[in-house]
Amino acid sequence: MASRNTTRKKNFLLLHVDQQRYDCLGFTGSSHVKTPYLDSLANHGVQFTNAYSPCPLCCPERQTLLTSLMPFHHEGHWNFDNGSRIHGLDPDSFAHWPGILKEQGYRMGYVGKWHVNPVKTPLDFGYDYYSPEMPIDRHLLAVCHQDVHTKNPSTPAGLFGNGLYDTLSLDHTNTHRKAKDAIGFIRSSTTCKEPWHVRLDFSEPHLPCYPVKEFLDLYPRESIPQWNNYPDPFIDKPEIQKKQLSSWGIEHWTWKEWSSYLRCYFAMISQVDDAIGRVLTYLEDADLLDDTLIVYTSDHGDSAGSHGMLDKHYVMYEEVVHVPLVFSHPNTIIPAVAQGFVMPGLDLGPTILELLDCIVPQSFTGKSLVPVLQESTLRVRDHVFSEYNGQQFGLYTQRMVRDERYTYVWNPTSVDELYDHENDPDELWNVCKESANVEIVTRMRKILLEDFSNDPMVSNLWSRFQLLV
């Protein structure tokens, strides 16, 4: 079906969230997390079941998203407070798709979390309008007394959420103020002849999660089931994983503490969904849906109690690297489920430029997903890969390769990991040292060497020697 407006390019709305687990959304199969608006968006578009983060850390992934280059290439290895590229990604050093959209006449709006450069803003990357998110005022937090084990938001447990909720009215929360700002920019742009692009970037559901009580009450602690991979005995696994628990001060947490954490996490997901719903409802009421390409994804996930762990550091487990990805446009995208491997951080740039009839820079290393959007059974990748370079409690290097059955993780300073998803979907048992898996490990290491052939951490003489032993 042809677009009603054939003389104007599609509008483009990017819905980007922070630390969203793939399995904590209604449309991905969760029966206990309520996301009706995102479910509807996914059911009317193409949802990718095997989308993976190229680097499960905020700044590197967001820089990769703009440039379609891996962190080892753009050199943004860490968040701003730990790394050589202290000032973040330079907009003049690499081609980036927002700059291309600006050159093609798009009216550009950015609302919410940035985390690409601490000095330069989206305005330096081609955006005309930038509305940063407001900091959380912890004086406006209340305690849900029936199950919280701390009343002090300055303590580690309080910083994790765990029973604290926002006392502001829903309209005045960070999530819904951002939705209102995005709607305002869209409304002002509809009177222009130029197409518009809005990136609505939520810092949520990244910890600490302080939802309003309306959403917190949707998730009584006793209703939250225990993860299959909680707890984890950490047998034959890198010591740093167990160390991460003591670094966070959560090594003695029981499911009582984790269910308190998760009710806040789930509630914040539902609150983000509601904010996104307001934007989608506005587009429908304003008769703009047919002319707007919508993409929803996340930078990475959250351990959120799986393996007894918090956040995303020092691991390449599914909960951290597996992310949601949805493309929706009524006139060009037929609803479907695509099961092939994709990497949103790398693949989004070339895909949206092709969909919006723009030239893709030769420097982009991602793969266009347009063929998959046209025929969901097609596959552009037979595996995915990811890198991590340390943060939070110290530097620690990892490289990962994931195919249909196995995840292999190279840990240069610790034991390597191999997980068999067919026999161990919860990744509890590291089978890397088993003699029956020698050929599998060898094959995965060769793939890793190819994927990271330009990565100095992998391609140097000593690392190659270690991987080829």
Image: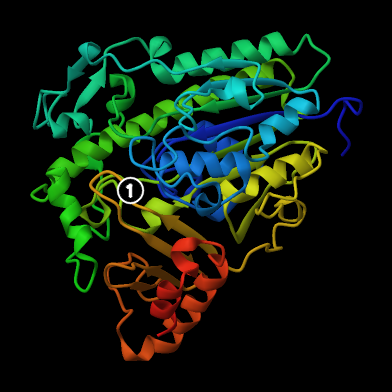
Relative side of 32 to 449, left or right = left
Instruction: Name the residue beneath numbered marker 1.
Output: 312
Relative side of 317 to 53, left or right = left
Q: Position of residue 213 (x, y in %)?
A: 28, 20
- The quarter of the displayed image where residue 415 is located: bottom left
Against 469, residue 427 (above or below) is: above
Q: Position of residue 52 (x, y in %)?
A: 51, 54
Which of these two is toward me, 86 or 441? Answer: 86
Res. 43 in view: no
Amino acid on which disc 1 is placed: Lys
Against 194, residue 379 (above or below) is: below
Q: Position of residue 191 (x, y in %)?
A: 78, 9
Q: Residue furthest bottom?
A: 435
- Residue sitting at 68 percent across and 36 percent down? 97
Which of these two is toward me, 266 or 459? Answer: 459
- Residue sitting at 83 percent across and 29 percent down? 9
Which of these two is toward me, 467 or 144? Answer: 467
